[in-house]
DNA sequence: TTTCATACCTCGTACCCCGAGGTATAGTGT
DNA sequence: ACACTATACCTCGGGGTACGAGGTATGAAA
């Protein structure tokens, strides 16, 4: 139903997928490839993560989808809804806050 | 037994706890407070996360503990084992790689 | 025809986070 | 004496998510 804010945990897949789709409509397979390239292999969304995530996000009204036939293959294109954009903003803020927090702890002086 | 590498997910509690303890021996309650201060409130480890995490990490040989009586209260001090230090290195590297990946995706141009 | 890339999917598991609640001591305020 | 706060530990149950493995199907290349 309603989205929960990530506390410490991930939500990374949701965040990066929303970010990609905020730029342009894409289909699942394409998202996976783009992510790998953009992140320079640091992030890899397996299909067992990606597809369920897309479905969940659509069910929550963050995405909308439409099928498209290309060369006899079916692609399902997703786009971000206004609600999804709001969610993206919040997740981005959370991520920044959280990752800065971790970096501060990691960067803490070893002594004194 | 063996530790799993975080793929996308968290492991943040484990990472930051190891990092704190790598600097000096600490007890649970102290860790929670330090974390809040160091991260400037961006990170808060609830006790329901912290204590189980400490126990698991000890069971995995990443930490060693010793009880200490202070003012009639029992504190359990934890320190990092050599194995824990290796684990910390790996987690730190993972974290850096991962967070840079996310930042690259987030920072990707909005158009063209 | 076999293999590879494309393109979708689900199931089960494992893992982890988290809130709520529980015990106990020491100190402070009334 | 009584209550409240801070210290200090703990567990349990639930919820959510990530993930690997496996499954279907098409088109192109070997």
Image: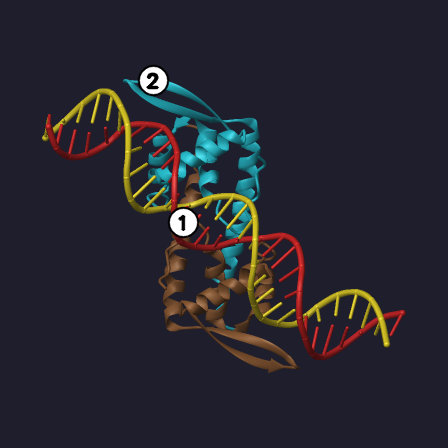
Chain colours: A cyan, B brown, C red, D yellow
Q: Residue B57 appears in which quarter of the rendering?
A: bottom left
Quadrant of image for the N terminus of chain B: bottom left
Q: Which residue is mark 1?
A: B98
Q: Which residue is mark 2?
A: A69
Q: Secondary structure at mark 2?
A: strand
Q: Is residue A21 left or right of residue A83?
A: left
Where does the image place residue B98, in percent across and percent down from the top left?
A: 40, 49
**Chain under callout 2:** A
| Above-or-below relation of B11 to D3 | above
Q: Residue B59 appears in which quarter of the rendering?
A: bottom left
**Chain under callout 1:** B
Q: Secondary structure at mark 1?
A: helix
Q: Residue at x 57, y 42 (%)?
A: A4
Residues packed near mark 1 inside 10 Å, few (<14), some (14 to 19) or many (20 plus): many
Where does the image place residue B107, in percent across and percent down from the top left?
A: 45, 39
Q: Residue at x 40, y 59 (%)?
A: B91
Where does the image place residue A64, in percent across and percent down from the top left?
A: 49, 25
Q: Is residue D18 left or right of residue D16?
A: left
| Above-or-below relation of A93 to B61 | above
* Spatial separation of the CA atoms under disc 2 and disc 1: 35 Å
| Above-or-below relation of B102 to B83 | above
Q: Nearer the viewer, residue A106 or A43?
A: A43
Q: Nearer the viewer, mark 2 or mark 1?
A: 2
Quadrant of image for the C terminus of chain B: top left
Q: Residue at x 60, y 82 (%)?
A: B69
Q: Nearer the viewer, residue B55 or D6?
A: B55
Where does the image place residue C20, in percent across and percent down from the top left?
A: 66, 54
Indicate which disc residue A7 carries: none
| Above-or-below relation of A69 to A58 | above
Q: Are marks 2 and 1 on the same chain?
A: no
């Amino acid at each position: 139903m309603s989205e929960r804010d990530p506390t410490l945990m991930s939500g990374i897949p949701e965040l990066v997928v929303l970010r990609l789709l905020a730029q342009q409509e894409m289909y699942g397979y394409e998202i996976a490839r783009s992510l790998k390239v953009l992140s320079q292999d640091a992030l890899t969304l397996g299909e067992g993560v990606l597809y369920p995530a897309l479905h969940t996000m659509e069910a929550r009204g963050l995405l909308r989808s439409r099928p498209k036939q290309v060369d006899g293959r079916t692609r399902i294109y997703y786009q971000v809804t206004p609600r999804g954009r709001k969610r993206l903003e919040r997740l981005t803020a959370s991520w920044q806050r959280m990752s800065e927090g971790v970096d501060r702890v990691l960067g803490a002086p070893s002594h004194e």
